[in-house]
Amino acid sequence: MPLTTNDLARDGEDSSVELRAVEASVLRKRRAMWGGFFAVLVPLVVLVGLQSWWLADLEHSSKIARKAALRNYLDAVGKDVHVFYLKISERALNLPYEVLTPEKLEKAAHYFKKKEVDGARRLFIVSFLDKKGIVYFYNPETVRLEIPDFSAETLAVWAAIAPWKVVIKKDKKVETTTLSVDQRDPKNRIILNPITDEWSRLVGLTGMIVDEDYFEQQLLPRAAARALPRFSKAKDLVVVVRDHNQQQVMPEAKALDPKQDVVRQHFSFMFTDWSIALQGSYASPESWARTNFVYNMTLSVVLAVVLLAGVSVALRTAAREMKLSTMKNDFVSNVSHELRTPLSSIRVFGEFMRLGRVTEQAKVREYGEYIETESRRLTQLINNILDFSRIESGQLVYRFEMTDLEEVISETLATFAVRLRNSGFEVDYHPPEDLLPEISVDPNAIGRAVANLIDNAVKYSGESRAIEVGVRRDGDDAVISVTDHGIGIPKDEQERIFERFHRVSTGLVHDVKGTGLGLALVQHIVTAHGGRISVASEVGKGSTFSLHLPLEACGNTEPAVTEDQRA
């Protein structure tokens, strides 16, 4: 059955129903979001209140609290040691896997030279790309890798890498590449860093033998001194460190009875069989409790504020995502409308011709022009969507060639001729005063950009039916401008109109159907050509969009990537 104007009207009503459904969905999501916010806020307030009560009660538990504070001190010392070895390991042992190929292995010595660190007695490397799996020690004097003689160090390294050789034999993928520690030989403690290729296959190991003297004489005193200032009322606290044989290493003065240790714990990550303890007094329990109450209460409030700030940021992010979702939903609804309009027209005229209702050649030609025009309009819409999809995936490629801009503009205007004539529009074309040189651009992309600007001018011209298109030279740029005398754009919206899916909120503008992609695509095209787009608009008087393209060659055939993808 042939389509009628009633069918087109029903299409519009369907789009309105879809839009109302989208708005209802967004309202439900917004209510759920605020409900989630209060669901977090109320427990947080209760938590802060309970924390205050607990801290007040803590004043009556001074002995337990005192031990907790002293243990925090030990944690701080242990953490300092832990972080130190993590940092030097990450600095010295992180090498690109390409270096482990047999032909490039010698370059590892130069990497080690650049990354020499305190606290490492030896650096070594083993490549499993070489089937022999030879261990090479780094010699800082010759800046070369050398095969070591048999020694306790060599034996410790062999024992440490043995489990990794099993991984190689079983051809297993290495899921994690975290540092591992081997302390079976207390005199030769080893940190290993597995090196994997891009397929998560183990290709080698880098490692270091830790310098025990450096740990004992420099790192420990430094870590203890760095953590001590936070205990401003410490009187005669003594840090006691004992090695794996429970021999006192620090302090060197007199031996202290382990039974007098107030708190004691072992180090983590490295030297885990060594212990660190505290002896001595630390202010009065009452003074400590009061100080600790104020400190912890302040910390709790700060954490609550930080958490609230985090919730606020999350709320803003969720609101932004909801807004984007709404814009995308509007986009789908508008695209549906935009697709239906030309398709319905094509179907109507096609059915008229198929049913033989048109016999005059002039009418056949007229209907054919209508069908061609609507087809071009449909093609432009689909191209916009496809280009946007390619931009989002970073796969849009521009193909540059020396092009006559005037020819591009003429071809673009020709594709709009029937549509503009049937809509009563008149286009005033202003060629350049002087002949422009050919410019290196993607002619199809520039044509699509100009077509989008003309399409916008048609949509937002209001009662006006005059459009001006001009090409001119401005210094080192060629400028293509499209001017309408329609409803215009408010100043506070002019910077945002180039955002994807953004639709101007002003009533007259917002009533016009569109995908919200045209200007975003235009800006992307011009930016990829090394140019820029500018807009001059006044509400009620119209808008002028100008494409500024550098006349110098700017050929770039790499995929166009968006700022979001770079980030």
Image (cartoon, grey):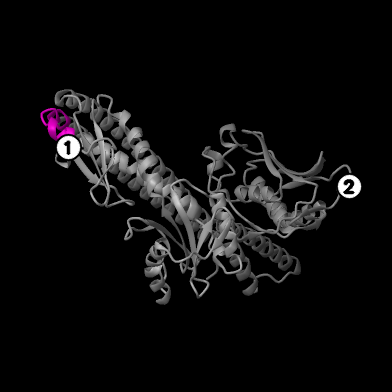
Q: Main secondary structure of the magenta part?
A: helix
Q: Which residue is mark 1?
A: 262
In front: 530, or 491?
530
Q: Is residue 493 above or below residue 17?
A: above
Q: Could you give the CA–CA distance between mark 1 and mark 2, rounded to whole angstroms?
A: 91 Å
Q: Pinpoint residue 145: horizontal percent, then vertical percent.
A: 55, 61
Residue 360's label in the rendered image is: none
Of helix, strand and loop, which one carries label 1?
loop
Which residue sits furthest right? 434
- The region drawn magenta spans 54-67
Give the amino acid at mark 2.
Leu
Decide if residue 69 is in sight here: yes
Density class for disc 1 (Cα within 10 Å; few <14, some 14-19, many ≥20) is some
In front: 392, or 48?
48
Which residue sits furthest front? 254
Q: Pinpoint residue 380: horizontal percent, then vertical percent.
A: 64, 58
Decide if residue 330 is in sight here: no
Residue 435's label in the rendered image is: 2
- At horizontal 44% and vertical 66% (from top left) the residue drawn is 150
